[in-house]
Amino acid sequence: MILEELRQKVLDTANLLPKFGLVWMAGGTVCARDPQTGYVIVTPSGMPYEALTASDMIVTDINMNLIEGKNRPSVALNLWTGFLLARPDINAVVHTHSAYATAFSVINESIPIITETQADWFGQPIPVAPYLSVEDKRFSSLPVEVMGTGFAVLLGQHGPITVGKSLEHALERAVTLEEAAHTYAIARSIGNSLIFTDQMARSSFDYYHNRYGQRNENLD
Ligand SMILES: [Zn+2]
């Protein structure tokens, strides 16, 4: 079995999605690219994560040709590989159905930057891509275009997608996004929310990624 370590990391990340309350049952998807081979590892379609082992993950190339795996991959594999193809700077994609972020996709409203933690991880508001059926020709390209240079997009009437240079970063963004959406929903119900300007959000992001703490690591 090839890429055993990364297969296990994909599965470990998938198992954390229900633990963080971001998906239920077999919902969501985790996908990662191995930087050495360029191969893509993705969770199988419609199988509860708890029962899976590393051998249940599917390995394809970036054009979705099967390299190794016995299960059917996520039905939206063309979308996950679409993000990886468009963004050489990222290696991981996490998709969830977390309730508050999904609620904003239902009212078709982007999530502004409202807290410093959210600014640090995203640097710009989280847009909504219009709802598209998985069979629509634009399904694999439009959400990628809407996300642009950002790190998250809401699939209309479906749920959020977050990306990162590693699985850890894509997962942390999924958790941070849900926390921000939850906070924003509460804040709107009790008063007028203050919103970061684009410049405030960008400068917070730049500070966190370039100068914060002990590291000199780019967190993208
Ligand atoms: Zn979904």
Image: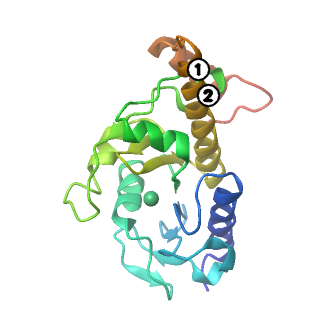
Q: Position of residue 156 (x, y in %)?
A: 34, 45
Residue that badge 2 annotates: 183
The amino acid type found where label 1 is placed reads: Ala
For the C terminus, the image quarter is top right
Residue under the image location 55 percent in, 48 percent down: 98
Disc 1 element: helix
Q: Residue 10's quadrant in the figure?
A: bottom right
Residue projecting furthest to the left? 137
Residue at the spot 60% in from the left edge and 52% down from the top edge: 22
The numbered disc on residue 187 is 1
Q: Nearer the viewer, residue 14 or 105?
A: 105
Pick the front one: 149 or 119? 119
Specify the amino acid type for callout 2. Answer: Thr
Q: Residue furthest front?
A: 190
* Residue 20 x/y as whole percent: 69, 51
Instruction: Determine whether the residue tagged by mark 2 lies in a helix, strand or loop.
Output: helix
Asked if the residues shown at circle 1 and circle 2 are in contact, with their CB atoms under 8 angstroms apart, the answer is yes
Q: Where is the N terminus found, in terms of image quarters?
A: bottom right
